[in-house]
Image (spheres, rainbow, N blue to C red):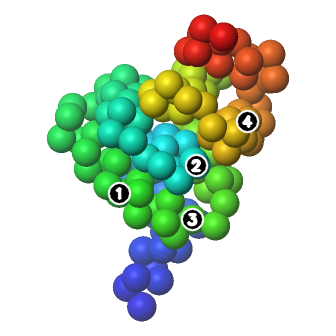
């Protein structure tokens, strides 16, 4: 019963949803989860990509290395249980400005390109997230070009 109550508070709101610290943690976890989605998209999570995820979390969220590692571990568990991207993008949409969303999309490209190869599944995930974050196709391509230089 306690687990059900916690799930309802985390996913559907309630008294805990009004807590600024909980909202910030949900946002941070959503950002990390979206980066993990790219990390796992090609079914070959290289060490370079994993390092880039940690660097991206640190840069986007301004957290220390220990917090980054904790967020990454928690995000991986969340992604394992997630049924779609909406739960993550909704948290980002509610907390990020458009400029911050562009920064997230660029960091997703950095994760995809960390192993020097952008797989079609990685690009597909980034495209879907960009759409859900209301990032235009032009902005999506511009972020890709900034990262890949292509």
Q: Are marks 1 and 2 in contact (CB under 8 Å)?
A: no
- Horizontally, is 48 left or right of 9 in the view? left
How many other residues sit within 10 Å of disc 1, few (<14), some (14-19) or many (≥20)? some
Q: Are marks 2 and 3 in contact (CB under 8 Å)?
A: no
- Identify residue for label 1: 74
Q: In the image shown, does 46 or 147 lie closer to the viewer? A: 46
Q: In the image shown, does 80 or 95 lie closer to the viewer? A: 80
Mark 1 or mark 3, earlier in chain: 1
- Identify residue for label 2: 41
Residue 20 shows in the view: no
Distance from disc 2 to disc 3, alpha carbons, whole Å, reads 14 Å
Circle 1 sits in a helix, a strand or a loop, which is it?
Answer: helix
In the displayed structure, 65 sits above or below 11; it is above
Residue 58 shows in the view: yes
Mark 4 or mark 2, earlier in chain: 2
- Identify residue for label 3: 82
Q: Nearer the viewer, mark 4 or mark 1?
A: 4
Q: Nearer the viewer, mark 4 or mark 2?
A: 2
How many other residues sit within 10 Å of disc 4, few (<14), some (14-19) or many (≥20)? some
- Identify residue for label 4: 127
Mark 2 or mark 3, earlier in chain: 2
Distance from disc 1 to disc 2, alpha carbons, whole Å, reads 18 Å
Distance from disc 1 to disc 3, alpha carbons, whole Å, reads 12 Å
- Can you give x and y, in whole percent of width and height, for residue 120 in the image? 70, 39
Q: Nearer the viewer, mark 1 or mark 2?
A: 2
The residue sitting at 74% across, 18% down in the picture is: 141
- Can you give x and y, in whole percent of width and height, for residue 72 in the image? 34, 48
In the displayed structure, 96 sits above or below 37; it is above
- Horizontally, is 52 left or right of 100 in the view? left
- Can you give x and y, in whole percent of width and height, for residue 150 in the image? 66, 11
């Amino acid at each position: 019963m306690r687990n059900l109550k916690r799930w309802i508070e985390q996913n559907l709101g309630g008294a805990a949803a009004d807590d600024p610290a909980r909202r910030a943690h949900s946002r941070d976890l959503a950002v990390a989860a979206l980066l993990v989605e790219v990390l796992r998209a090609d079914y070959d999570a290289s060490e370079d990509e994993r390092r880039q995820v940690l660097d991206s979390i640190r840069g986007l969220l301004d957290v220390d290395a220990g917090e980054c590692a904790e967020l990454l571990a928690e995000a991986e568990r969340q992604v394992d249980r997630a049924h779609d991207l909406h739960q993550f993008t909704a948290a980002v949409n509610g907390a990020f400005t458009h400029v911050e969303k562009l920064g997230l999309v660029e960091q997703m490209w950095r994760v995809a390109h960390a192993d020097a190869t952008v797989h079609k599944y990685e690009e597909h995930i980034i495209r879907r997230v960009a759409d859900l974050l209301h990032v235009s196709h032009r902005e999506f391509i511009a972020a890709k070009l900034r990262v890949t230089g292509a």
